[in-house]
Structures are given as C-alpha cells and as structure tokens.
Image (cartoon, rainbow, N blue to C red):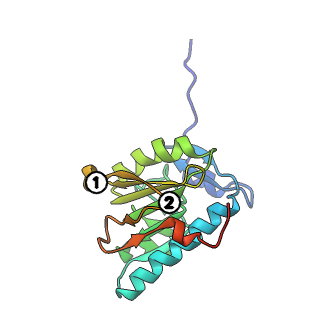
C-alpha cells in the first residue's frame, strides 16, 4: 500500500496564482492570505512610518518595506513570505524581486486566521533563517510579543500601553497606544 505524499510547492506555484490571490510558501507548503482588516493596515502604516522616521533621523542604512513585499528567506524555491513589515539593513539582499535572505526585523500583525502560523510556523522559520528581531502585534488582545532572536532571554510580551524598545535599535521606543491615539477600534 502506497503512502499518501503531500505535494511540495515552489515559488513558481506562487507566481502562477490567479491575479489578486496572495499566499505565502513555507517549506513547500502554501498558506493562503486573506485581505487585512482596517486596524491591521493602520498598524502597518503607523509602525512603518515610525520606524522609517527613526532610521532617517539617525541617517541609518536600513530600509523599511510594508507588505506586500517578497522575502525569499533561504535562497531556495520552497520559501516565500510577505511579512507585514520587513526591515532590511544589508542592501546587498535587496533587488527588484524583493529581499533575498532574511530581513533583520520582521513585524507581523496577527489575525484570528493567522495566529497559529505567526506564533508557530513563522517564529520557527524566522529564527532558523537568521531574522534578528520578530514582533507579533495582536490587535484583538492589544499585545505585542517581542522575540530577540539573537538573545533569547530578552523575549517578552507587552501591552499596547507599554513602551516597547526595539532589540536592534536600543534607543527606538514605540508605544502602540500613542500611535493609534486618534483611532477607536
């Protein structure tokens, strides 16, 4: 009796999806993406703007890319992700397709449909790919889980009202509640 073998998908399959359909590819498995909510987009915009303003003020070399932005994590054809926010400090990784290799900092805005992927599959994948810092922002619980993937002991969870310090930028402090002060959600 033959065992059932799952299909292994590649980046070619991602690019063959119908127009408008977005998905990510992790270890040959396709994860469909649903359209983001308004608060999701507000968080992506405000966080991207805050981080970009910080980098610009410091005359830094890193670049901030909000989704959709292609990240080819491992230089193979079975891993393709579109993090909500990618911060890339090694410009040699950037090309017209996106980022070849791991960003330094990734932020994902979790939704009920992506929770298990963001907290499990992506955490493992980002850690093993060399991402230095990973934030999971949960608008429903109003929490931010910060993973310092270079220094495991610094990983922690914060409320939106807390001041959150970046791991790769020691003097960057972000308060999510202040970023959303004008919005009621």
Seen from the viewer's position, the closer of residues 111 and 80 is 111
Any part of residue 97 in sight: no
In x, y percent, where is residue 61?
36, 82
106 vs 14, nearest the viewer: 106
Query: Which residue is at the far top?
Result: 1
Q: How many marks?
A: 2
Q: Identify the residue shown where x is 31% and y is 54%.
A: 149
> Element under label 2?
loop
Q: Residue 5: image x %, image y %?
A: 55, 27
- Residue 8's place in the image compared with 175, above or below, is above
The x, y position of residue 144, in whole percent, is: 46, 55
Residue shown at the point (35%, 88%) measured from the top left: 59
**Disc on the earlier residue, 1 or 2:** 1
Height in image: 51 above or below 133? Answer: below
Q: Nearer the viewer, residue 175 or 43?
A: 175
Q: Which residue is mark 2?
A: 160
Tell which of 99 and 166 is nearer to you. Answer: 166
Q: Residues within 10 Å of mark 2 (few under 14, many from 20)?
A: many
Residue 54 placement, left or right of 42? left
- Based on the displayed image, in which of its 4 quarters is residue 69 positioned? bottom right
Q: On screen, 175 above or below 159?
A: below
Q: Position of residue 42 (x, y in %)?
A: 63, 68
Q: Secondary structure at mark 1?
A: helix
Q: Which residue is mark 1?
A: 154
Picture quarter with the N terminus? top right
At a point 63% along the width and 44% down the height, the residue shown is 113
Which of label 1 and label 2 is nearer to you? Answer: 2
């Amino acid at each position: 009796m033959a065992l059932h073998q799952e299909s292994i998908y590649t980046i070619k399959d991602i690019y063959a999806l119908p127009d408008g359909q977005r998905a990510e590819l992790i270890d040959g498995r396709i994860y469909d993406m649903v359209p983001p909510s308004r608060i999701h987009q507000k968080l992506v915009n405000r966080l991207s703007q805050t981080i970009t303003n910080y980098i610009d003020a410091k005359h830094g070399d890193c670049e901030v890319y909000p989704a959709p932005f292609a990240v080819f994590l491992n230089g193979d054809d079975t891993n393709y992700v579109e993090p909500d926010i990618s911060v890339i400090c090694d410009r040699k990784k950037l090309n017209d397709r996106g980022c070849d290799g791991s960003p330094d900092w990734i932020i994902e805005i979790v939704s009920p449909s992506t929770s298990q992927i963001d907290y499990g599959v992506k955490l493992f994948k980002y850690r093993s790919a060399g991402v230095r810092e990973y934030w999971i922002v949960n608008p429903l619980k109003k929490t931010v889980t910060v993973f310092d993937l270079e220094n495991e002991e610094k990983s922690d969870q914060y409320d939106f009202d807390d001041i959150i310090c970046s791991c790769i930028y020691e003097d960057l402090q972000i308060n999510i509640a202040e970023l959303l002060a004008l919005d009621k959600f």
